[in-house]
Amino acid sequence: MVACYALVKGAWTLVTLSTAIKDWMKTAMKKATIMQTQHLRLFIALVFCAVTGIAAAQPKSTGGPLSSWNDGETKSAITEFVERVTDKNSSDFVPVAERIAVFDNDGTLWTEQPMYIQLAFALDRVKALAGKHPEWQEKQPFKAALEGDLKALAAGGEKGALELVMATHAGMTSEAFSAIASEWLKTARHPTFKRPYTECVYQPMLELLAYLRANGFKTIIISGGGVEFMRVFAEDVYGIPPEQTFGSSIKMKYEVRDGKPVLIRLPEIDLIEDKAGKPVGIQRYIGRRPIMAFGNSDGDFEMLEYVTAGKGPRLGVLVHHTDAEREVAYDRESAMGRLAKSLDEAKARGWVVVDMKEDWRRIFPN
Amino acid sequence: MVACYALVKGAWTLVTLSTAIKDWMKTAMKKATIMQTQHLRLFIALVFCAVTGIAAAQPKSTGGPLSSWNDGETKSAITEFVERVTDKNSSDFVPVAERIAVFDNDGTLWTEQPMYIQLAFALDRVKALAGKHPEWQEKQPFKAALEGDLKALAAGGEKGALELVMATHAGMTSEAFSAIASEWLKTARHPTFKRPYTECVYQPMLELLAYLRANGFKTIIISGGGVEFMRVFAEDVYGIPPEQTFGSSIKMKYEVRDGKPVLIRLPEIDLIEDKAGKPVGIQRYIGRRPIMAFGNSDGDFEMLEYVTAGKGPRLGVLVHHTDAEREVAYDRESAMGRLAKSLDEAKARGWVVVDMKEDWRRIFPN
């Protein structure tokens, strides 16, 4: 069960929660219409401001490096923490070498609705590969994937999900997989936001990443998503290089094929970097406890718990998806990125909760 | 077989090559006597120079960042490569983000004779823990370890070696293990060089690490040694932070014990980062192919092969232990750090071979 879940987080969700997905997709389509209306409203407001010189009656941002964050408690909690750990005269000063901030990816840095982006990739791969596998037309779980029959996919259970993932993510070299994922990201579009997935990233988080780096932080991804999928775009989009991007992984084997050394992706789970797998990933890949952690779901609970339990100044931050108009509002009941336990315990643990609707002036880049 | 070998590389070697170890230790003791004579010679030479103002008749170094490297083809091959990839006007220019250099540890950055330092640690740990394990006095492989009976240890085979390693390296938290290793490194002394192990590092390599970093390189350890053992000293000694130090690993489990989140080291192999495991480690931890690789043994063959087979400028470097007077001369027949295949193929593959005796003005830091 666990194995399927985190390799491509979505594959697991797909298997167990197909009905929920359908509902989400319906809601998301509705949101798209709402968004168009919202764009019109924003446009009218901007014209009004330009003519009258009066600022729109919305929360304000003082600009600067976090200009997409509205002023308020959330933004202050982050900037005050950073100021404190970078101030040499502060008792909370942290040397540059120890300034490490870890980030979940799905739902924290980019959207995970109506489904994990990597799940959309996996389903598209099945379609793309179907020509070479005529047997898939009648063979589950591929038949279900090709027909978009989520109910049948769910019926295939763990075994089916794993078959699906391994057929689309293993059996080729690392280089070949990267090329496939890269090509897909260039052409695929988000179904409701109508833009490339790499533009479905959160502008306030991009600013935050840059702000932290400008303050001597190393920004590192610790995600449940597949590591080699994320490495395809993380450097260009987030400014986070491959050696600082970590996620769930499958095993690899080194071979020399026709005189060329290659790494073959094997159909076998290596690390599931979700829930309790996140602190394990932190120790494996980083080897020291970060001082800041950013997540958005219960899959990030252990990461925030581990990071904020360390000695000295620590900050845990949860992104709460509250904006039904500009993105999608979801938490406790969501098939993807369920947020319940983390939210319930946030206050007692001193974790900052970002209210996307209130705290973010903008969601996506222009 | 493989499992034992690389977790603590020495444990495996100990099991299969006990006779060879004994011979090495005898030779090393002999070397110690030779070294004392050599120190006297050096002292006399220095006094002579000071009085007469005439430089000693040994190979010269022009000083600068690599002042412990004698001028010559080896040094030039390295510096010319670095100049080429950092020169914006060169067709071989490499952006900073891609300037990654990987280093083996044992025998490349610090000594591995008369035995891997981590093996010495494991044997000392058995002695330290023996009081809590009265049964070890009669139980193999512990009895053999306590008595220094290498023949009996070898007779215990793979199972015995694994028992030894797991008893000394697993079953505690990561933090506890680091504290134990750190404490040991503070007090243990090399048997023949008579100095802390952390001073049995190669001065020319320390200079090389600093030189590469000054030229925009990220220096990363990819070693067969245990990752959490190396992380204890790599930052202080090499300037390489934990998040750039990778080696063989055992599995870990996240737990909250008495309200405190911890990572438990399990008695189960995770990755054996030696031979073909090195390119796997590179992809797992770095996610892109380095442009420089430094090793010293056949365990580094695949790493150098993988790195130097990439497109664009690449440099593979082997440290050849040729200095019987200042360190230990060994290659093809050595129990630890065997160097045969890599040496045989170095020329055809364009790998640079460092002749320690000729190319290094100094071996250890003062």
Image (tube, coloured by chain):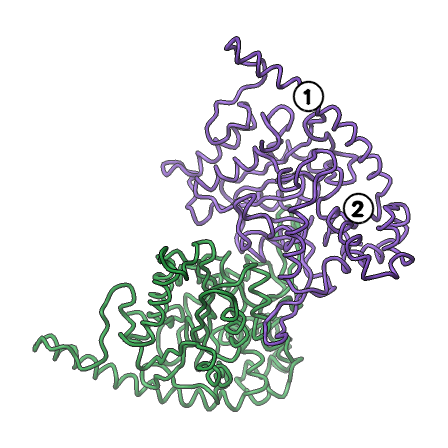
Chain colours: A purple, B green
| Residue behind mark 1 | A38
Label located before the other in sequence (1 or 2):
2
Residue B245 placement, left or right of B202: right
Q: Secondary structure at mark 1?
A: helix
Q: Residue furthest left?
A: B52
Residue A233 placement, left or right of B89: right
Q: Residues within 10 Å of mark 2 (few under 14, many from 20)?
A: many
Q: Is residue A186 above or below residue B165?
A: above
* Residue B236 appears in view: no
Residue A353 screen position, x and y as percent: 62, 31
Q: Within the image, what quadrant is residue B296 found in?
A: bottom left
Residue A75 screen position, x and y as percent: 53, 28
Q: Within the image, what quadrant is residue B48 found in?
A: bottom left
| Residue behind mark 2 | A13
CB of mark 1 within 8 Å of CB of mark 2? no
Chain of the residue under label 2: A
Residue A342 screen position, x and y as percent: 69, 37
Which residue does the image show at 37% across and 60% down from the upper left?
B90
Which residue does the image show at 63% across and 67% down from the upper left?
A263
What is the total number of numbered labels drawn onto the structure image?
A: 2
Chain of the residue under label 1: A
Q: CA distance from mark 1 to mark 2?
A: 31 Å
Q: Is residue B321 above or below residue B67?
A: below
Q: Given the image, on which type of amino acid does mark 2 rest? A: Thr
Q: Given the image, on which type of amino acid does mark 1 rest? A: Gln
Mark 1 or 2, closer to the camera: 1
Q: Is residue A270 above or below residue A310?
A: below
Q: Report the disc number at residue A144.
A: none
- Quadrant where the C terminus of chain B sits is bottom left
Residue A127 placement, left or right of B50: right
